[in-house]
Amino acid sequence: MKRVTLKDVAARAGVSFSTVSRALNDRPEISTETKAQVRAACKELGYIPNIAARSLVSRRTRTIGLLVPDISNDYFAGAALAIEEAARENGYRVLLCNSLRDSAREAEAVDALLSQQVEGLIVAPVSAASADSLQDSLHSLPHVYLGNNHGDDCSYVVIDNKRGAYEATRYLLCLGHRNILYLGGRQGSLTRQFRVSGFYKAMEEVPGAHAQQKIECDCAQETYRMIRALLGRRELPDAVFAYSDRIALQVLQAADECGIDIPKQLSLVGFDNISYASLPRINLTTVSQHKRQVGRTAVLRLFEQIQGKVGRTVDILQPELIIRGTCHRRAAR
């Protein structure tokens, strides 16, 4: 079939070619009625704009880039969906790349997004060091970081991880638990450092509380074997505070296989509030990072930069403890 052109749209709408062009570019000199008339003609004819050609004329692609470690992670999937929705509401598209937690791949992805002439970039960096290495490429482009992996002189949106861990640990302590294991997170992770800091802050406030911590292994299978070994010991902790809901789900599985009743024998709290956490057979007590709010706030700050606003922005959002069914009040000793 012959491709519908702007001339076809102009003829159907009863206006000039230039008027159609200005209407589709939302120029202020074109009336609201004429713009509606042109859009109606586009819809009737099935006109598909040539975005590449329009960007050459306007020097704007109306596209932003999003770079995350792994879109299969429920947190980043939820944030990405919120980012795409917010961008679409403002007439923008999103190009997505995954770094897979590899700094070399992350740098390649940034170069690829820049080659697509994105107008701004939202990045969840692999590490603080990798974020620092990206600055030469990003310094002149509007950009916002997600999370804790970045330097001091940048715009970012982050959840107060220390506060979230503190509130979750306080909850366990209020239930009478004193021997609590903090489980998971990778060595060197700034996010883990903040959460562990909140965990110890709460533990230190209660006399007689005994804190333990274990990091994740190099792969999920090794981490699971470690969890099985921990739960196979004669003396269980009173409670486990997991770095993430993913780790908490592994604890639930291992406990089931070891014949350990959660929450009667072991209380469990996760962090993230992934979609599976609320399922009836899981019913996990966890900390919500409000990933939709994180994503939408990042888009808001990025568009402020795209529109010319100068100055660093810092948004530290408050997490929320979601109490469900994996914690139990401990009987008095």
Image (cartoon, helix red, strand yellow):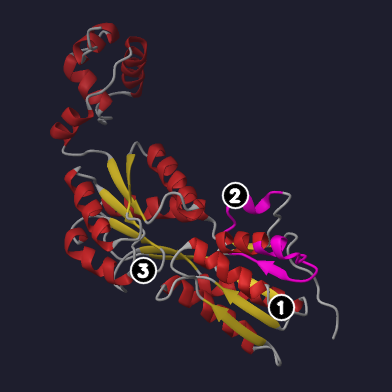
Question: How busy is the neighbourhood of tag 3: few (under 14 within 10 Å), some, or many (20 plus)?
Answer: many
Which picture quadrant has residue 285?
bottom right
Residue at the limit of the structure toward the bottom, as seen here: 207
Side (left or right) of 53 relative to 64: left
Could you classify mark 2 by the number of other residues whose Cα lies within 10 Å: few (under 14), some (14-19), or many (20 or more)?
few
The answer to which image quadrant residue 332 occupies is: bottom right
Whether label 3 touches label 1, CB < 8 Å: no
**Residue that carries the numbered disc 2 in the rendered image:** 275
User: Where does the magenta region start and end?
Assistant: 254-279
Classify 291 as above or below 26. Answer: below
273 up-or-down from 96: above or below: below
Q: Residue furthest right?
A: 332
**Residue 266 colored in magenta in the image:** yes
**In this orientation, does residue 164 appear?**
no
Q: Secondary structure at mark 3?
A: loop
Categorize mark 1 by other alpha carbons within 10 Å: few (<14), some (14-19), many (20+): some
Of residues 256 and 181, the one drawn nearer to the viewer in this rendering = 256
**Which residue matches tag 3?**
149
Indicate the position of residue 283 as horizontal and vertical percent values: 71, 55
**Which residue is pictured at 16% across the width and 28% down the height?**
53
Mark before the other along the chain sequence, 3 or 1: 3
Which image quarter holds the N terminus? top left
> Which residue carries the number 1 mark?
236
**Amino acid type, residue under disc 2 in the picture:** Ser
Q: Are marks 2 and 1 in contact (CB under 8 Å)?
A: no
- Indicate left or right for 296 with 204 as reference: left
Inter-mark Cα distance, 3 to 2: 25 Å
Kind of residue indicated by mark 1: Leu
Q: Residue at x 21, y 13 (%)?
A: 5
